[in-house]
Image (cartoon, grey):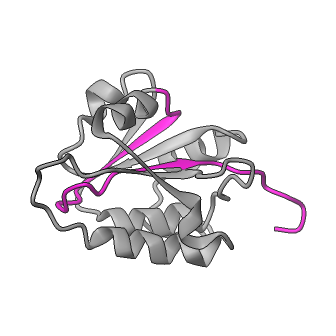
Amino acid sequence: MLLGIPPLISPELLKVLDEMGHGDTLVIADGNFPAASVGRHAHVIRLDGRGGADVLKAVLALVPIDTYDRTPVKLMDVVPGDQVETPIWDDYRELIREHDPRGDAAIGFLERFEFYREAANAYCVIATGETAQYANVILRKGVVSSSV
């Protein structure tokens, strides 16, 4: 065991997060997301039984958010016509506000298939057991500075 590493971060995930460089992206995928097919060229790590907000919180404890990208956090927008509430977005916004001075301005939205296309280029896809719909997040890694 190590000090300061959130307990839900597995050794495999810790290794992959460390391998990521500035500008690389990771996906935190809900339980409905096609993690295996979209992530066929990525490291797919399963965290079944874990919620999206808990995983985002743990990842943000270790990974800085990119400051060079206008919206380094991307959410999958609700498909027009879907009558779905997205309260998990409030949890995500709160976590982003804690880690990025831009707050909500750091968050962008992508149409479903655009989200899939961008997710297909991710370095890592974390498949969670999150049951909330539209709980998928793409996060672009920033620079770890000497002041961190």
- Tell me which corner region of the image, top left, top right, bottom left or bottom right, holds residue 43: top left
Relative height, residue 140 to residue 37 (above, below): below
Secondary structure, magenta segment, majority class: loop
- Residue at horizontal 45 percent and vertical 32 percent from the top: 118
Q: Specify start and end residues of the magenta stretch as a single range.
A: 121-148
- Expressed as whole percent of the image width and height from the top left, the position of residue 95 reads 50, 74
| Residue 138 included in the magenta stretch of the image | yes
Residue reaching furthest to the right:
146
Image coordinates of residue 56 in percent, x first then y, are 45, 63
Left or right: 60 as drawn, with respect to 110: right
Q: Which residue appears at 33% of the width and 51% of the height?
A: 136
Q: Residue at x 28, y 25 (%)?
A: 37
| Quarter in which the C terminus is drawn | bottom right
Residue 14 against residue 101 in the figure, above or below: above
- Left or right: where 51 falls relative to 124: left
Residue 27 visible: yes
Q: Residue furthest front?
A: 80
Q: Is residue 1 visible?
A: no
Residue extending farthest to the top is: 41
Judge by depth and name the residue closer to the eye, 105 or 65. 105
51 vs 55, left or right, is: left
Horizontal and vertical percent position of residue 4? 63, 73
Name the image quarter holding the N terminus: bottom right
Give the residue at x 57% y 75%. 97
The number of numbered badges drawn on the structure is 0
Residue 110 magenta:
no
